[in-house]
């Protein structure tokens, strides 16, 4: 199973309307994996309406620097859909020094971004 498939499996676990999952890896090892989490989930506090999947995994690791994050969203029909990290998550990922992010674009493609390189172009890949 690829890491992006692992992120898709996390997304399918989400109880949010927008189903997003994220897996943080380093050296081929999974550091943390999570779907996005609603505010009323007992394991989180009340400061945010939703923890995006990216934020949820960052909260679970102590040393995310240099890691690679895989983010996936599944549409209502259960297919991979655009999961580009929002500006808030991009800032959080850059400050955590996550080196590379792969996210689903549609059912066939992923793109890559480098949060620490402001204004970097993303590039397309097949899943
Ligand atoms: Zn976000």
Image (cartoon, rainbow, N blue to C red):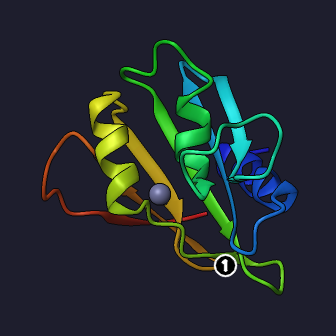
The residue singled out by tag 1 in the image is 107
Q: Position of 31 compared to 14: left or right?
A: left
Q: Position of 41 compared to 91: left or right?
A: right
Q: Which quarter of the image is occupied by the C terminus?
A: bottom right
Tally of numbered tags: 1
The answer to whether the beta carbon of the residue marked 1 is less than 8 Å from any atom of ligand 1 is: no
* Percent coordinates x, y for residue 9 in the rendering: 82, 53
Q: Residue at x 40, y 50 (%)?
A: 89
Q: Nearer the viewer, residue 48 or 118?
A: 48
The residue most toward the bottom is: 77
Q: Which quarter of the image is occupied by the N terminus?
A: top right
- In the picture shown, does residue 41 fall above or below 96? below
Label 1: which secondary element = loop
* Percent coordinates x, y for residue 26 in the rendering: 53, 22
Using the rendered image of the protein, determine whether residue 74 is visible from the camera's viewpoint. Answer: yes
- In the picture shown, does residue 61 fall above or below 104? above
Q: Residue at x 84, y 62 (%)?
A: 15
Q: Residue at x 81, y 58 (%)?
A: 14
* Percent coordinates x, y for residue 10 in the rendering: 78, 50
Q: Position of 49 compared to 116: left or right?
A: right
Using the rendered image of the protein, determine whether residue 113 is visible from the camera's viewpoint. Answer: no
Q: Nearer the viewer, residue 108 or 34?
A: 34
Q: Residue at x 66, y 67 (%)?
A: 73
Crowd tier of the residue under label 1, counting other residues whose Cα lies within 10 Å: few below 14, some 14–19, many 20 or above: some
The residue most toward the front is: 46
């Amino acid at each position: 199973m690829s890491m992006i498939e692992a992120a898709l499996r996390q997304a399918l676990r989400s109880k949010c309307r927008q189903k997003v999952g994220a897996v943080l890896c380093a050296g081929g090892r999974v550091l943390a994996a999570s779907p996005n989490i609603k505010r009323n989930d007992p394991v989180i506090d009340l400061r945010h309406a939703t923890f995006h999947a990216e934020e949820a995994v960052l909260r679970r690791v102590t040393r995310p620097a240099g890691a690679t994050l895989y983010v996936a969203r599944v549409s209502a029909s259960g297919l991979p859909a655009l999961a580009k990290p929002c500006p808030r998550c991009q800032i959080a990922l850059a400050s955590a020094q996550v080196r590379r992010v792969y996210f689903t674009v549609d059912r066939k493609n992923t793109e890559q971004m480098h949060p620490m390189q402001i204004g970097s172009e993303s590039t397309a890949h097949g899943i």
